[in-house]
Amino acid sequence: SFTSVIQTVALILSCSQKVIDWHDPFSQYANSLSSLSFCVPPDLREIVFIIQSQSNYFHVRQAERRRADLLKQAHSLTEKPPLVLLLHSLSDNEGDWSILPLLPYLSYSFGKNSSWIVFLEEETNVKMTKLVQVLAKFDKNKEWFLGKPLHDKESTIIHHYAFAENPSVFKYPDFAAAWALSIPSSCSVLRDEPLKSDFTIDLKHEVALYIWDNGKGPHLTAVPELCTEPEDSPQAQHCATSLSSEPPLCGEPVNKEDIFVAVKTCRKFHSERVPVIKKTWEKDALFLEYYSDHADPSIPTINLGVPNTERGHCGKTFAILQRFLSSTVPNTKWLLVVDDDTLISLPRLQVLLSCYDPSEPVCLGERYGYGLSQGGYSYITGGGGMVFSREAVVQLLNSGCKCYSNDAPDDMVLGMCLNALGLPVTHSPLFHQARPEDYARDFLAHQVPISFHKHWNIDPVAVFNKWLKDDFRAKPSGGLNKSAKTEL
């Protein structure tokens, strides 16, 4: 169509203005003209979009909406749309969310007819015309790894203290801004050796390490047009990608009486950690019990008859699951299990849970993985908070799943059980296993976090007040209204 022709010409001119000085002498002009071989906008059929989707109904719906929007934009540009795939549907391997096991499939499937693989999250808004302009600046025949760079201010446990001498030297992509691999890059990273770690903790960092390959592969190239600005903000005008201005609200926040909160503690932390909970988030819970190895009526704590262990706490967690289904505690739709050094916003959790159906087996939190490239399993890391629907707890206990020892890692045992049952773990980046200091500042800047974990070298009450405390001036949407943007 005439409109498509005009848009294509505009893309070429937009790109050429950055490459050619039209007042060059002829010899320089000739050299500049030759560089336009990689400045011509790619055929949209050469771009494969992969939405990093999940199999839970809410996330499938979000991903389908994102795919429909991409295809609608593509059809306005050309009659030959790109391929838009949902990550969770590419294979039956639940661990493919970690992307690295999928790279051989992606390279073999799309290496001949495609130039770029663009990954984006469910909430990533894309301006197709602008994105095509961006990709046109890079030679598709060379190795490129493109994204919005994040870096660590200090070495952190979630990245295995990598680059401890200078953590900021290594850049990794903010997935929310979208990131891209040229096909030569996706092919070059194929190798036979196993991953250096069995654990998948922070996927974006581990993907970047794998692609970089100790300097043998491409480093992340910063692309300013890949953004995490709110889509309706003035700063997003130059962006090819942006984020929704508000988090999804799927209805009224769930009621307090729908959530039962279980706090795991032990005698030695009764005077150190429990008071922090009482000063911060306990007041937002209607039903909450503290489970310990010692019954202390002043808190009060409940002794479930499981001896305290220095690690793992599997026996205690499974006793909590059994108690949740008993008539001893209120019959609620949701169970939240946290550590005594977890800081959490229950009102924000109530908003998030409005998007999930408690009649389904929902297991929600920050997702980690173990041995995913060798057919391992996913699990919710416990410190950030583990959320289970009643149906999930019923299926877990009915399966006969149990601890192999009281000090087994409870979150990993639960992950193995869920994997055996074929129940997916649902990930939310708003839960955090570590402290705010352990995450890139730009990553947290576009979040309204739900939890953090650990009291190491911090004032936990101050951290809660800064990151997790809300100003509840009512909004028409029923959402949360932060009194001010959290200062970093």
Image (cartoon, rainbow, N blue to C red):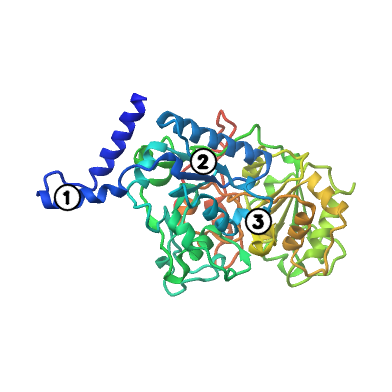
- The amino acid beneath tag 2 is Leu
Q: Nearer the viewer, residue 137 or 352?
A: 137
Name the N-terminal-most of marks 3 and 2: 2
Nearest to viewer (mark 2 / mark 1): 1
The residue where tag 1 is placed is 30
- The amino acid beneath tag 1 is Ala
Q: Quadrant of residue 300?
A: bottom right
Nearest to viewer (mark 3 / mark 1): 1
The quarter in which the C terminus is drawn is bottom left
Compared with 283, 99 (above or below) is below
Nearest to viewer (mark 3 / mark 2): 2
- The amino acid beneath tag 3 is Gly
Asked if residue 440 can be seen in this view, the reply is: no
SS of the residue under disc 3? helix
In percent of width and height, residue 41 lies at 34, 42
User: Are discs 3 and 2 less than 8 Å apart at CB?
Assistant: no
Residue at 25% across, 38% down: 13
SS of the residue under disc 2? strand
Q: What label does residue 83 carry, if any?
A: 2
User: How many residues crowd around disc 1 within 10 Å: few (fewer than 14), some, or many (20 or more)?
Assistant: few
In percent of width and height, residue 387 lies at 71, 50
The residue where tag 3 is placed is 95
Q: What label does residue 236 carry, if any?
A: none
